[in-house]
Amino acid sequence: MGSEDHGAQNPSCKIMTFRPTMEEFKDFNRYVAYIESQGAHRAGLAKIIPPKEWKPRQTYDDIDDVVIPAPIQQVVTGQSGLFTQYNIQKKAMTVGEYRRLANSEKYCTPRHQDFDDLERKYWKNLTFVSPIYGADISGSLYDDDVAQWNIGNLRTILDMVERECGTIIEGVNTPYLYFGMWKTTFAWHTEDMDLYSINYLHFGEPKSWYAIPPEHGKRLERLAIGFFPGSSQGCDAFLRHKMTLISPIILKKYGIPFSRMSAGPAGRAGEWTVRAAPADPAGSAGEPGAPPGSPFPPTRAWADASERANTCSEMKQLAPSQREGCELMQSPAPEAAPLLRVGL
């Protein structure tokens, strides 16, 4: 099974990239077990480049009338690499309207020389011109006949919860679709109940991620508690609120290891991002794009860790886009780690 080798068990906790054949790609659970066997979970993130013959949708020319029911404006406050993000719900719009907004002079990606230049501009301008995020849209853009890696039917235990118990938990055992623009961001957080999650970018510029290895996740949590004492006093699981942004400069200063990754079309078929449990990611979008996301149970001992979950004491006070990670409870697993996805 193809991968860019980072060592048999990935002792350096580097983000690994995998290139499965179509035959290997057919069995989702088996392939996730394989990348775990290679140590991919130790980084908290892995990239999977699907085979060229695999397509989730034949055309995207017919999606402009899709409705984004509750877009949010992301308002960021703070300075010196430490920020808090607030979400303000806006009126519904269509994908076509969102595309025009994202490409407008006010919201478009600035000119840049390379990724490092764009990353500097992101952190320097984070508090200016609040972007609009088309978040938490129930559903996906997959064609109905897509059998492999269909984000709406991954054939995991979560599908059994819906099929056998009739229980639907939106965004957990159903997929969510997102439309992002320059600087749209999800803050450092860990996934619901230490589930894995996957993201696929249908179109647009590559999406940028930061990830901290799970074995160092508690260090980030302690750092965040020190910098944001007001938030942590009200809720032990405050990173679940997806409001806390800590820059790479701060992480370096305090010796917290992290990795960067960009995943997306980049002139070819889209790429998958598999987020391991219990990893801490954060990240953003560079230009207009459409990534769906869905959690799923990992193949390792997820059930034991999930039983140690804590509830979020502030859940009822949160906006819907922040509440998702608290509705199932936050896991205090001893090696939890955060993730940041940013709009670069």
Image: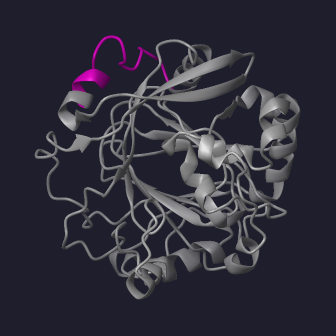
- Locate residue 228, reporting x and y percent: 81, 30
Pick whichever, 84 or 257, lies toward us. 84
Pick whichever, 263 or 322, lies toward us. 322
Res 150 quadrant in image: bottom left
In this orientation, does residue 124 appear? yes
Q: In the drawing, does residue 16 fall left or right of residue 27?
A: right
Our reading of the magenta stretch's main secondary structure is loop
Residue range (magenta): 99-114
Name the outermost residue toward the front. 316
Is 100 colored magenta in this rendering? yes
Residue at x 35%, y 38% (from the top left corner):
70
- Locate residue 63, reporting x and y percent: 16, 45
In this orientation, does residue 276 appear? no
Residue at x 54%, y 52% (from the top left corner):
324
Residue at x 64%, y 35% (from the top left corner):
243
Above or below: residue 50 compared with residue 36: above
Pick whichever, 191 or 4, lies toward us. 191
Q: How many labels does the image show?
A: 0
Above or below: residue 114 compared with residue 25: above
Pick whichever, 149 or 96, lies toward us. 96
Name the outermost residue toward the left. 62
Q: In the drawing, does residue 279 fall left or right of residue 114?
A: right
- Locate residue 230, reporting x and y percent: 81, 30
Is 303 colored magenta in this rendering? no
Residue at x 79%, y 52% (from the top left corner):
217
Res 163 quadrant in image: bottom left
Res 23 quadrant in image: bottom left
- Locate residue 300, reporting x and y percent: 67, 79
